[in-house]
Amino acid sequence: MKKKNKTALIFGVTGQDGAYLSKFLLKKNYVVHGVKRRHSSINTYRIDDIYRDQFGKKKNFQLHYGDVTDSLSIHNIIKKVKPNEIYNLAAQSHVAVSFELPEYTTNADALGTLRILETIVKIDKNIKFYQAGSSEMFGKVVESPQNEKTPFYPRSPYGAAKLYSHWITINYREAYKLFACNGILFNHESPLRGETFVTKKIVSGLCRIKNGNQKKLYLGNLYAKRDWGHAEDYVEAMWKILQHNMADDFVISTGKQYSIKQFINMVAKQLSMKLKWKGAGINEKAYDENKNCVIECNIKYFRKSEVDTLQGDYSKAKKILKWKPKHNINSLIKDMVDHELNLLFK
Ligand code: NAP
Ligand code: GDD
């Protein structure tokens, strides 16, 4: 008898990771259902190509209106879709914005996870659950690099909400014997990254400056260090976490870290732009070959409490899941720069 295709349900399907994960799972012959929020304008640009690819074919990709702050919608969708696996990627994911919207961020990023877990317990305890945890939970790091045993010290409402989700996922695993797992993912980027995250802001800003479409880029702290990977590699890790024979938690990272300033210099190099840095602190600026100031710092982009340094140790995932990143920082930047230049030339 032919084996039935697995069904996955993705909360947060319209985001960067939702789009990459949908494509990854469809290639693995999953039937993919995604939950999208109602917007006043269309915001499905990251997954529109999946729809287009489906014309004339069996529909293996379906969207449902829902919201992780709305228990009824969660219940109704899970009951209807009957998924084998749920990926909870839904979140107010911007750390700086979480200081402006702390209550909403907590509702979506912490209680949203609880609502899904409770629904799984009520409807079908066999549904596997993936929680999109974050290296932001390590916050003011107590050791470097960070692994699954490193103590947490969140530095934002976002980090604190993700930490609640981390522990409630473990609690439901232990209390109800759910196959519920946490991925503790370090920063991952791609051409589909949201416009206000620093890598995308730098790549699109410098491409536009190089092309004459923009004069200057305004940034915040240039000396924070991040461990940046590619979203394409990280969604594979999410899937691997749910295919392991036992529910567990994994750090997913590259093990390498760079400062924002180093990232800027690497992007400039790929664009053959020669940047000269002058000044210090808030007055540090970058100038191009024609002595035009192209990068300036602005106090509004500094965090109320910063996460200064993040660097992950992914050896557990490497050993147990046989996962390792395929991309490095140069191939990540090249992918992002090529995409941006293509858009500009279109
Ligand atoms: P993203 O691009 O911001 O996508 C977030 C997704 O969540 C979007 O589809 C968004 O929908 C949806 N969402 C937000 N609030 C919601 C709500 N109340 N109900 C239902 N859906 C809601 O984020 P990402 O980079 O893909 O990250 C995916 C997940 O991994 C997030 O939980 C993030 O916190 C976590 N994470 C990300 C990274 C990273 O570096 N990218 C690292 C660690 C963890 P709209 O399109 O309608 O806004
Ligand atoms: N966004 C932004 N904009 N960040 C800036 C800017 C700027 O203009 N200038 C400097 N930064 C610094 C921030 O202060 C931070 O230290 C660093 O760049 C990275 O900022 P983001 O790209 O916004 O990412 P993040 O590290 O705060 O959060 C991302 O990664 C987390 C995993 O560690 C998000 O994707 C989170 O959802 C994710 O959990």
Image (cartoon, rainbow, N blue to C red):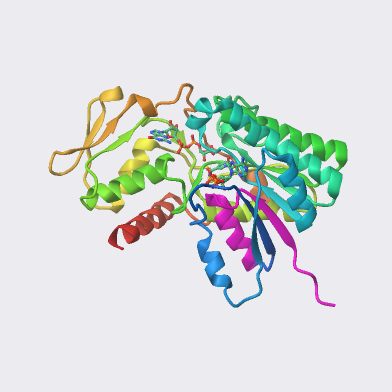
Image point (31%, 63%), residue name: 346
Residue 66 in the magenta stretch? The answer is no
Image point (80%, 47%), residue name: 179
Instruction: Look at the picture and state if 33 lies above or below 218.
Output: below
Image point (59%, 47%), residue name: 37
Span shown in magenta: 1-27
Q: Is residue 62 left or right of residue 39?
A: right
Q: Is residue 227 left or right of residue 318?
A: left
Residue 15 in the magenta stretch? The answer is yes
What is the x, y in percent for residue 80? 77, 56
| Of the pair 240 and 254, the residue shown nearer to us | 240
What is the x, y in percent for residue 317? 66, 48
| Of the pair 13 and 144, the residue shown nearer to us | 13
| Of the pair 10 and 207, the residue shown nearer to us | 10
Name which quarter of the figure residue 261 lies in. top left
The N terminus - image quarter:
bottom right
What is the x, y in percent for residue 148? 67, 36
Name which quarter of the figure residue 177 lies in. top right
